Image (spheres, helix red, strand yellow):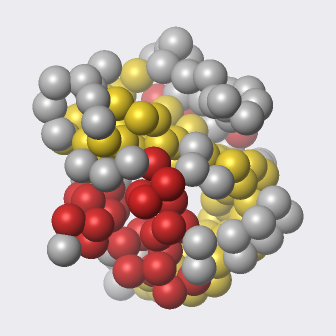
Amino acid sequence: LCFTTTTCYQMATCSQMATRLEDGAPTQISPYHVRRCAWIDAPPDVVWNEFTTFDRMRAWYGTGHTLTRYEPRVGGIVETTVTLDGKLERFRGQVLSYEPGAEITFEQMWIGSDDEGPTQVTIRLTPLDGGTLVELFHHGYERLGGSIADHLAGYEDGWTVRQVHALRDLIAA
């Protein structure tokens, strides 16, 4: 786990990192996931302000890819674009969980792919040591079909700490 450093890279093969939210059960994190995290020197409610509008979310989550649509509510749509191998690709999905101050989970389906189902992105805020541990999980590779090992390796290589560091830097400014 990531309790003593400000940056974590972890490829996990179990779902034991799930924490209990005060207002309900957390999203179940698939055993096949990528996790990136950062500790932010601010309480969760301050961090959560950066999740409340498209412009605020785009300022930090749109690093490394472009956030093109964000509707912050259960049932809302999240869409991003990214250039891969010189081609613009789109990912889209519905917001499945929106717990202010605690967690957002949304689907991520590669538009035009042969994937069987969407993966999920969960961003969880946990009060810790006077600040907030922000964990970004990309999970559910078993829903895609094909080789889970290949999917996990590909996404592990693709995710960095850009987003969580951009969020941390935005709040520190």
Where residue 22 appears, as percent x and y from the top left, is 66, 30
- Quarter assignment of residue 2: top left
- Is any atom of residue 4 visible in this view? yes
The image shows residue 122, relative to residue 58, as above or below, that is above
What residue sits 50% from the left and 67% below the top?
49
Q: Is residue 154 left or right of residue 89?
A: left
- Is any atom of residue 34 visible in this view? no
Q: How many marks?
A: 0
Quadrant for the N terminus, please: top left
Q: Is residue 79 left or right of residue 17?
A: right
Quadrant for the C terminus, please: bottom left
What residue sits 57% from the left and 82% below the top?
54
Q: Is residue 156 left or right of residue 49?
A: left
Where residue 77 appears, as percent x and y from the top left, is 74, 72
**The one of 11 and 88 positioned closer to us in this rendering:** 11
The image shows residue 61, relative to residue 87, as above or below, that is above
Where residue 166 appears, as percent x and y from the top left, is 26, 67
Q: Residue furthest right?
A: 75
**The one of 38 and 79 positioned closer to us in this rendering:** 38
The image shows residue 91, relative to residue 129, as above or below, that is below
Where residue 16 appears, as percent x and y from the top left, is 52, 13
What residue sits 49% from the left and 74% below the top?
57
Q: Residue furthest left?
A: 5
- Quarter assignment of residue 133: top left
What residue sits 71% from the left and 76% below the top?
71
